[in-house]
């Protein structure tokens, strides 16, 4: 399996994952079109309906891009250029496995947080415009979710730097231990 085919497979899986998460989010947006009282469908709701349609279009675009056109994402982010091996085999170097794990963790962070973030933004916008709840909404969880998305993105894009840092810190204590053993052995020799 080449790095490019690995990324195609992974991006298609991410697209399907986002599609399944969209199943949770999209019905909430559709409730805007069917108010319980038809007199509630005022011009105040059109802003929320527009935002909702934009978010649904973003979901559709992301799913379409990831499932049907993953080559564009691979080329833009240069995902297949960050691997030393041309082909993946079962005897992959440890740093490659760590890199793949970091990418998967970052992608999972994004996939798990993105629908929740959109939902919280939607509820915040709705509370500010329709419900007029005002300062009663706490934006802390929205900020935390935004941070998770950014961290996940940084893990995916900068996985090589994270792997290098992990490998460097993994080797550093081993060198200190070997050095102290050599000093102890030198002192015990007559």
Image: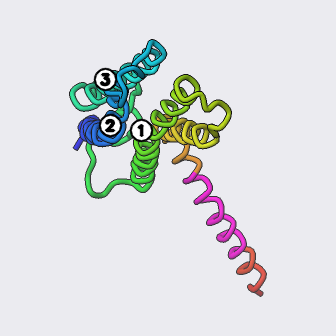
Q: In this view, does 21 lie above or below 65?
A: below
Q: Are marks 1 and 2 in contact (CB under 8 Å)?
A: yes
Secondary element under disc 1, as helix, strand or loop, is helix
Residue 59 marker:
none
Q: What's the residue at 67%, 71% (across, down)?
A: 177
For this orientation, the residue located farthest to the top is 43
- Of the image marks 1 and 3, the number of the one nearer the N terminus: 3
Specify whether residue 172 is painted magenta: yes
Q: Mark 1 points at which residue?
A: 115
Q: Residues within 10 Å of mark 3 (few under 14, many from 20)?
A: few
Specify whether residue 92 is painted magenta: no
Secondary element under disc 3, as helix, strand or loop, is helix
- Which quadrant holds the N terminus? top left
Q: Name the residue under label 2.
A: 22
Q: Residues within 10 Å of mark 2 (few under 14, many from 20)?
A: some
C-alpha separation, residue under disc 1 versus residue under disc 2: 7 Å
Q: Give the range drawn in magenta.
A: 166-182
Q: Is residue 16 above or below residue 32?
A: below
Q: Which of 124 and 102 is in front in this view?
A: 124
Q: Do the residues labelled 1 and 3 touch (CB within 8 Å)?
A: no
C-alpha separation, residue under disc 2 versus residue under disc 3: 12 Å
Chosen colour scheme: rainbow
Q: How crowded is mark 1: few (under 14 residues within 10 Å), some or many (20 or more)?
A: many
Q: Do the residues labelled 2 and 3 touch (CB within 8 Å)?
A: no
Please, what is the dominant secondary structure of the magenta stretch?
helix
C-alpha separation, residue under disc 1 versus residue under disc 3: 14 Å
- Of the image marks 2 and 3, the number of the one nearer the N terminus: 2
- Which quadrant holds the C terminus? bottom right
Apparent side of residue 67 relative to residue 125 in the rendered image (left or right): left
Residue 61 marker:
3
Residue 2 position within the rendered picture, expressed as x and y whole percent measured from the top left: 25, 40
Q: Nearer the viewer, residue 154 or 130?
A: 130
């Amino acid at each position: 399996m080449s790095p490019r085919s690995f990324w195609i497979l992974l991006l298609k899986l991410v697209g399907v994952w986002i599609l399944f998460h969209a199943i949770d989010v999209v019905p909430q947006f559709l409730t805007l079109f069917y108010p319980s009282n038809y007199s509630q469908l005022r011009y105040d709701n059109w802003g929320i309906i527009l935002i909702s349609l934009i978010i649904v279009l973003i979901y559709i675009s992301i799913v379409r891009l990831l499932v049907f056109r993953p080559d564009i994402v691979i080329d833009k982010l240069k995902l297949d250029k960050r691997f030393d091996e041309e082909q993946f085999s079962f005897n992959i170097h440890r740093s490659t496995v760590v890199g793949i794990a970091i990418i998967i963790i970052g992608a999972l962070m994004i996939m798990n947080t993105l629908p929740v973030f959109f939902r919280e933004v939607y509820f915040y916008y709705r509370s500010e415009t329709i419900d007029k709840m005002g300062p009663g909404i706490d934006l802390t969880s929205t900020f935390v979710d935004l941070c998770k998305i950014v961290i996940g993105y940084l893990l995916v894009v900068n996985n090589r730097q994270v792997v290098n840092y992990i490998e460097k810190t993994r080797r550093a204590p081993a060198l200190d231990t070997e050095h102290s053993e050599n000093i102890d052995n030198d002192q015990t020799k007559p």
